[in-house]
Structure formats: C-alpha cells, structure tokens
Amino acid sequence: MNIDGLGEKKVEQFHKAGWLNKVNDIFKLKEYREEILEMDKFGEKSYENLVEAIEACKDNGLDKLLFGLGIRQVGSKAARILAAHFKTMDNLMNATCEELQTIDDIGGITADAIVTYFKDDSNQQLIQSLKDANVKMDYQMEERVESFFSGKTVVLTGSLQQYSRGEAQALLEKMGATVTGSVSKKTDLVVYGEEAGSKLEKAITLGVQTMTEEEFMHELEKNEG
C-alpha cells in the first residue's frame, strides 16, 4: 500500500512475529508498540514515523488500495483503470464478469479473477474491516491541468504503440478532456493509432479534427514543458 517505513524487510519481520498476515493487520500494528520498539534498529522516532505513514495511507485512494489487496492479475496499471472506471469499491465489488470485460485493457482472465476475489467471504470481511478502519475506498482523480485538450470530447481509436488505451484515457482526463467511445457531431477530436477503422473514417466524414499518436505525444510534451 506504499507506506513509508514499511518495506519488504519490515513486512517480513512483522509477518514472522505474527503481527502481519492480512492487509488489514497493518492498521493493528499500533497494538504491538512495545514489541516493535524492542526490534533491532527500531527506535521511538522510527515507530512514530511508521504510525503516521500508516494513518496517511488510509487516504491513498481506490487505485492504490486495489493494488495492495493483491488480487490475481491486477497490477498497478489495471488497478488505476478499474478505479477510474468504477469510482468506488462497492461498484467494483458488484461488477459482473461481462461488465468488466467491456473495459479497455481488462480481459477475461482478469475479469474472472476479480469476480472470484470479491465473491470470497473472507475477502468481503477483509474489505469491511478496512472500511471500519476508515480506509478511503473511492477514486481520487488527479487535479486537472489546463491544456490543449481541456474541455474537449475525445475519442481514441486504433492500436496505440506508446500507451495502453486506459493510460491514454487517464492522461486525457487529467488534462481536462472527456473521453467517449463513439464519434458524433459532438466529438471535438479523434486520436488514432495503427489500423484505425470506422471511427476515423466517420471523423473525417463529419469534419472532426484528427490527431496521430505522434501528434498526441507532442501535445503531451508541450504540456509537460
């Protein structure tokens, strides 16, 4: 869960001591204050910093929490995509395999792993215990920045080489764009990669502005600069 002071070695030490077996055990470490202070190279200041970092991680947001749960097939990228799509843990827990597979970059194996995970009673209890510990379970969108894409309705099509569809969408949304799945007269821009098909053709027919992936990357670089 990306907690300062709780690296791999510390996790292993706490696990061997019997204090850390599930994700929610992180929030019970305060119960072992005296034992932790007796550990080698763990002074009062280190303990206080760890407790503060654990409290702070409750505000990390849904994407980091999903990654920290260790759901099979759900790495950091998939966690970001899922969090951005479903917005809350409850929405994700209620999602069907079919619904999950409609999301770009979420395949059948990953969808099945997610549904299986949340059907498990022990995992449901784990989520509830995290809620009881006041861990935030909603998606915290990054602050939007002004850019060429601000206020535009954008469609992505074709095979992008430098970004997954989900990553490109997240970048566009951060820069103030709204990403949709179909081209219409309300579409402001179509960003296209290799083997772009009917969406690109429709954009040209409607006179919608189009942009190659290379041009898209150039605009991103201008914004970073």
Image (cartoon, helix red, strand yellow):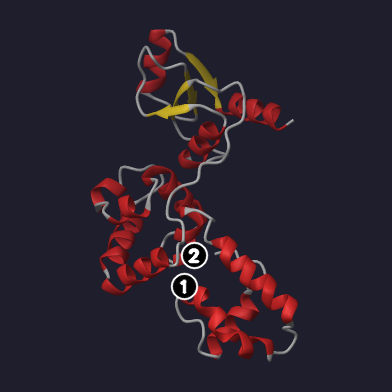
Distance between mark 2 and mark 1 Cα atoms: 8 Å
Instruction: Give the residue at mark 2.
Output: 68
Tell me the element at label 1.
helix
In the picture shown, does residue 51 fall above or below 143?
below
Residues marked 2 and 1 touching at CB (< 8 Å): yes
In the rendering, at what x and y percent does residue 168 appear?
52, 36
The image quadrant of residue 113 is bottom left
In the rendering, at what x and y percent does residue 158 appear?
44, 31
Q: Quadrant of the C terminus?
A: top right
In the rendering, at what x and y percent does residue 46 appear?
72, 76
Tell me the element at label 2.
helix
Categorize mark 2 by other alpha carbons within 10 Å: few (<14), some (14-19), many (20+): some
Q: Amino acid at mark 1?
A: Val
In the rendering, at what x and y percent does residue 120 appear?
27, 70
Residue name at image x 24 percent, y 52 percent: 96
Categorize mark 1 by other alpha carbons within 10 Å: few (<14), some (14-19), many (20+): some
Q: Quadrant of the N terminus?
A: bottom right
Q: Nearer the viewer, residue 107 or 28?
A: 28
Q: Which mark is residue 23?
A: 1
Residue name at image x 39 percent, y 43 percent: 85
Chain-order first, disc 2 or disc 1: 1
In this picture, residue 181 sits left or right of residue 67: left
In the picture shown, does residue 185 fall above or below 181?
above
Q: Amino acid at mark 2?
A: Gly
